[in-house]
Amino acid sequence: MASKHGMKARLVERLAHWRERLDAWNGELASRSVPAERRERVSELALNQKAARAGQRAPSTPAKAPRAGRKRPRSSA
């Protein structure tokens, strides 16, 4: 009969293997759910969020072009 330690080590190993497979499957499903034209922007946002969580400064992103037109003044109600 196998020792409890050996069984536990094997179980931990199998759980790690299944976690990796589920993570890969989840990533594939998430990739399919984002349209191709948005994938690059979503990846950039994800990297910036990971950098922020790690305490790093996010890389500077190019400035957005100004929107045409003027803002309407708020009415004081």
Image: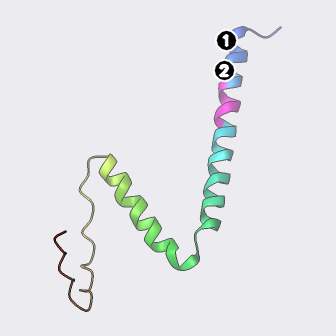
Circle 1 crowding by C-alpha within 10 Å: few under 14, some 14–19, many from 20: few
Question: Please, is residue 12 above or below residue 2 in the view?
Answer: below
Return the mark for residue 5.
Answer: 1
Q: Relative to residue 68, is residue 20 drawn left or right?
A: right
Q: Quadrant of residue 11?
A: top right
The residue at the far front in this view is: 77
Residue type beneath disc 2: Ala
User: Could you tell me what secondary structure mostly forms the magenta stretch?
Assistant: helix
Q: Are marks 2 and 1 in contact (CB under 8 Å)?
A: yes
Q: CA distance from mark 2 to mark 1?
A: 6 Å
Question: Please, is residue 62 above or below residue 56 in the view?
Answer: below
Circle 2 crowding by C-alpha within 10 Å: few under 14, some 14–19, many from 20: few
Q: Out of 7 and 71, give the one closest to the viewer.
A: 71
| Percent of width and height locating residue 18 | 69, 39
Q: Which residue is mark 2?
A: 9
Q: Which residues are magenta?
A: 12-16
Mark 1 lies on a secondary structure that is helix
The residue at the far bottom in this view is: 68
Question: Please, is residue 56 above or below residue 37 in the view?
Answer: above
| Percent of width and height locating residue 72 | 21, 83
User: Could you tell me which residue is drawn at 68 percent across and 38 percent down?
Assistant: 17
Residue type beneath disc 1: His
Q: Out of 2 and 52, give the one closest to the viewer.
A: 52
Locate the N terminus and report the quarter of the image it occupies.
top right
